[in-house]
Image (spheres, helix red, strand yellow):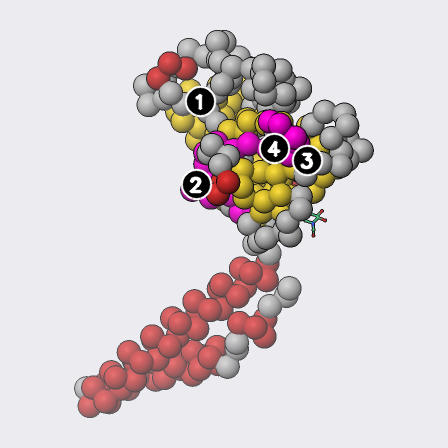
Amino acid sequence: MVNLGFLLFSAVLSCLTTVPGLIHHFGYEGRDEHIQCSYPLGYEGYEKYLCKNNCGNNDVLISTLQKNTTKYRTYDEKRKRVFIAIISKLHLNDAGKFWCGVTRPGTDIYTEVKLCCQTVSKTQSIEEGSVTISCPYDSQSANNLKYLCRGNRPSVCLKQAVITSNSPQEGRFRLTDDRKSRIFTVTISRLTLKDSGLYLCGVKRTSDYDLFSAVELDVKGKPTLGDYRIFFFYHLKKLSDAATSILQSLEGFLWFANFPLFYLKASELITECFKFNTIKPQDISLK
Ligand SMILES: *[C@@H]1O[C@H](CO)[C@@H](O)[C@H](O)[C@H]1NC(C)=O
C-alpha cells in the first residue's frame, strides 16, 4: 500500500516512465489485465468502479453495480478488501490514466492507475537448437547491469535472473552487450520445450525503476523420423513428376534420333519414377 496524500492506495501498470512512490506493474498487449485496488475497512458494501481520464460522469467504464461487458469485468473480493477490474485483450489504445473509485457520501475514494501497454515480441526456435533474444535499451543505460529472467514479474526479475551482465556465461545462457547499438542479447542453447514462455529483459537503473521489455519464446518439438520421411518422399515425388514430364517430351525426339539404348534407360527410369508416384506421403507417416 502506498500513501499518496488524499489518494489512499495506488497501482501503476506497465509505464516505463514511472511516478515516484507508485507500484510498478506490466500490462501486456493482447492479454487480460487485472487492475487491483485495495480499499479501507468498512467500505466492503459500497459500490466500486473503474473510470478513465478525469473520472467525469462519462468516464466510468464499469462498476460493481453493472453487468460485466466483453471489454471490462469487475469483482469485489470483500474479504481481502480488493476491487478487481479486468480489461480484456489489452490494446495500445487502452493506455492512459485510470482511477479505481469507491462511491461514498462526499468525495469518493480514488486510487490512481497508470496503464500503458508493453508489447511482447515473439520469437521461435526448435528443441535442441538455440535462440537469441534481443533486448534494446536507452542511451543512458549503456553502463548499467543487464539481466534476463523468466516470467512477467519485474519486481523479482533481478533476483530470479537466469543471466546477468556481471556473469555473462551461465550454463546454456550467454549474454553479450552491444553498447554501440544499445542492444544486449541473450543466447540460450540446447533448448527444451520447457524453455517456452515469457521472458523479461531488465536494465538496472539506480535513480528510477528498472527498464523492462518482454519476449515470448516458443520452442517447437524437433522433427521426428516420420516428418523427415514425409519431407523426403514429397520431394522425391516432385522430382519424379518433373523427370517424367521432361522424359516424356523427349520421347519422340529420342525415338527418331535412334538412341535405343538411352531410350531404354530412360523408360526404365520412368517406370521407377511411376513406382514412387504410387506412394503417398501419408502412407509412410510413422507418427
Ligand atoms: C464478472 O466477471 C468476474 C471475473 O470473470 C466474475 O468473478 C464476476 O462474478 C462477474 N460478475 C458478474 C455480475 O457476472
Check the image and report above or below for 50 versus 228. above
The residue that mark 3 highlights is 83
x%, y% of residue 127?
A: 58, 44
What residue occupies the far front of the structure in this picture? Answer: 106
Residue kind at label 3, given as amino acid type: Phe
Q: Amino acid at mark 1?
A: Thr
Picture quarter containing residue 37?
Answer: top right
Tell me if 148 is positioned left or right of 40 in this view: left
State left or right for residue 166 relative to residue 155.
left
In front of the other: 67 or 31 = 67
Q: Which residue is mark 2?
A: 92
Q: Secondary structure at mark 2?
A: helix
Residue extent of the magenta highlight: 88-107
Tell me the crowding category of disc 1: few under 14, some 14 to 19, or many 20 or more residues within 10 angstroms, Cα based.
Answer: few
Please give the name of the residue rendered at 46% of the width and 69% of the height, measured from the top-left corner.
234
Q: Earlier in the sequence, mark 1 or mark 4?
A: 1
Q: What residue is pinned by disc 4?
A: 101
Q: Amino acid at mark 2?
A: Leu
Compared to residue 210, the image places residue 87 above or below, namely below
Label 4 sits on what residue type?
Gly
Query: What residue is shown with label 1?
Result: 17
Which of disc 4 and disc 2 is earlier in sequence? 2
Residue depicted at x 64% and y 34%: 103
